Image (cartoon, rainbow, N blue to C red):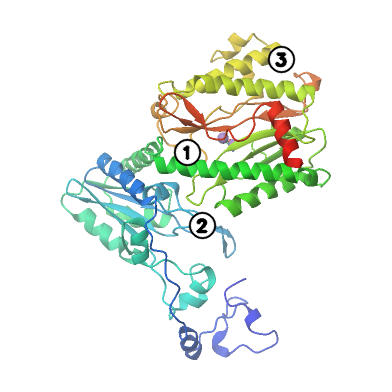
Amino acid sequence: MEALLDAQHPEGADPAPDSEDAKSHRTLPRSAAFRRFIAQGWGPRPAEDTAAAPSAPFAARRREVLSSLFPGEVLVVPAGPLVRRSNDCDYRYRPHSAFAHLTGLGTDREADAVLVLHPRGEGHEAVLYLRPQGSRDSEEFYANARYGELWVGPRPSLAAQEAVTGLTCRDVAVLAEELGASVADGDTRGLRVVDDADPAVTALVTPLRTGEAEQVRAADDELVTALSELRLVKDEWEVGQLREAVAATVRGFEEVVRALPRAVGHPRGERVVEAAFDGTARVEGNGVGYETISAAGDHACTLHWIRNDGPVRSGDLLLLDAGVEADSLYTADVTRTLPVDGRFTDAQRRVYQAVLDAADAAFAVARPGVRFREVHEAAMRVIADRLSAWGVLPVDAATSLEPEGQYHRRWMAHGTSHHLGLDVHDCAQARREMYLDAELRPGMVFTIEPGLYVKAEDELAPAELRGIGVRIEDDVLVTEDGVENLSAALPRTPDEVEAWMASLRG
Ligand code: GLY
Ligand code: MN
Ligand code: MN
C-alpha cells in the first residue's frame, strides 16, 4: 500500500483539484474540510503499557559503567533511522545494538531515538530523545506512511517511555539545542558519538566538535570499542534472554525435522526448511537473528549459504545454521547437520564424528582463565589430526598446525568461536587483547562451531567424502568453574540425532 492511493478514490472518478500530487500518481487529500474531518471523532487511545521493563535496572548499571569510562564527556548513542528496502518501503526496524544494550529496549523501539549521557558532576545524566506520540490532528497521522499512526500504529508517549525505561525522555526536536548547551558547559571535556548508527545525528554533532577529523574519528572509535567490550560479560538478565532465544531455536529445529518429508521432493526444499524455521522464529521471538543457512548436500560446503533455493535430496545431509532472536534482540546461533532420511551413511558419520570430536575437545578446555583462542586451537588439533589420518594433508598434522602451515584450514576456513549476544557476532569491535587473547570469564557467552567441508569438486579429498559438509554449533555460557552448553537440548551425537529425528517423525 502507498499513502492514500487511488484505491480510496475509485478509478475514473475525477480527483478534487486540491487533492492531486502533481509529481506522482498518488492523491493526497489536502482540502481544509478533509483535514478537519479526519482529525475529529476519535476516542481516547487504549491505555499505554507503562510497566517498568525488567531490563531497566540492568541497562542502568551498564550506563553507569560507561559513564565511569568517559568522565566529563557527552556521549551520544543513536538508535538509528528506518532503512529503505526499496522505493518507499522500509525494512522492519531494528535499533542499533549499542542503543538496545544501554536502554534495554528491544523489538522495533525506537526509530530516530537518541540516548545521550550528559556530564553532570562526577557522573552523567542519561536522557532519551524520541519522536513523541503524534497528534491525530496532524497531517502525519493520516498521510505519513513511515511514521503516521494510521499507517504504522501509535508511538509511545514520552511519559510511557519514561515509565518503561526509567530514563528521562524528551522530544527529539530539542536534541540539537540540548547537545549544544551540554557541549558549551565549561566543565565538559568533549563529545563522542556512535558514528555509524545514524548519519543525521553524526552530522548534527559535527559542528559541535573541536579537533582534527582524525582525532574526532579516534575518539568515536574508542567509544565504539568500549561499548563492544561492555558487552563481553553478560549480566543475569542477558543470560536469561539468551536461554529463551536458544529454547525457541530448539523448537524451530524440531519444526524443521517435522517439515523434512515435505522438503524432500520439493524443487526448493531448502526454502521449505527455511520457512519452517523462520516461521517459528517470527512466532516465538522477534524473528531470526541472522539469515538462516539451509544448506543441503554440497551447499553445506558454502559457509554462508543463504540463497536456500536448492532441493533437499534423500540420502544427503542438511546443514541448518539458524537462531531465533528474542524480542529483547538477543539471539541464538545454532547449527545441526541432519541426515535427510534420518540415518547417517558411514561416510557421513565419519565426517560428523570428526567434527563432533573437535567440538568436544573445545568444550573440554573451555573454562575461566583459558584464553579465548585456546578453544579454537583445541578444535583445530582434532581437525588437523583427522584430516591427516584421511591422508589429505600435504604435511603431518603438527606441521599443518604451525602458523605458517594451516593446510587443514582448506577444509574449515572459519573460526571455531565468536561471542554471542545482541549481535550474532557480538563484541566485534573489542580489542584483540579483550577478545581473542583474553581469558574466559564467567558470564561470557560464545559459540563452539567446528566444521568440515569437502566440496563435491575437491580432488584432494577421498571420493566418498566429497559433497559432505558438517558443522555442529552450540552456544556456551562460561560458569565459575567451566562452561554450560545452553543448546544441549538439541542432540549432538549421531545416534542421538537419529533417535531424536525418529521421535519427531513418529
Ligand atoms: N551463523 C553464522 C555463524 O555461525 O557465525
Ligand atoms: Mn556462529
Ligand atoms: Mn551459526
> Pointer 3: what residue?
392
Label disc, if present, on residue 177 of the rendered structure:
none
Ligand 1: image quarter: top right
Q: How far apart are the two marked residues, 2 and 3, measured between alpha carbons?
A: 47 Å
Q: Reading the chain from its start, which is encountered first: label 2 or label 3? A: 2
For mark 2, give the secondary structure: loop
> Pointer 2: what residue?
93
Question: Residue 371, image x and y in percent?
Answer: 44, 22
Q: Quadrant of the N terminus?
A: bottom right
- 10 Å neighbourhood of mark 1: few (<14), some, or many (≥20)? many
Contact, mark 1 vs mark 2 (Cβ under 8 Å): no
Instruction: Mark yes or no: residue 58 visible.
Output: yes
Dot in front, 1 or 3: 1
Question: Is the C-beta of the residue carrying label 3 under 8 Å from the nearest atom of ligand 1?
Answer: no
> Pointer 1: what residue?
426
Q: Decide which of 78, 58 is in the foreground and name it.
A: 58
Contact, mark 2 vs mark 3 (Cβ under 8 Å): no
Q: Reading the chain from its start, which is encountered first: label 1 or label 3? A: 3
- The amino acid pointed to by label 1 is Asp
- The amino acid pointed to by label 2 is Tyr
Question: Is the C-beta of the residue carrying label 2 under 8 Å from the nearest atom of ligand 1?
Answer: no
Residue drawn at (71%, 22%) of the image: 351
Question: Residue 71, image x and y in percent?
Answer: 22, 43
Q: How far apart are the two marked residues, 1 and 2, measured between alpha carbons?
A: 19 Å
- The amino acid pointed to by label 3 is Val
For mark 1, give the secondary structure: loop
- 10 Å neighbourhood of mark 3: few (<14), some, or many (≥20)? some
Q: How far apart are the two marked residues, 1 and 3, measured between alpha carbons?
A: 34 Å
Which quadrant holds residue 467? top right
Q: Decide which of 397, 240 is in the foreground and name it.
A: 240
Instruction: Mark yes or no: residue 306 visible.
Output: no
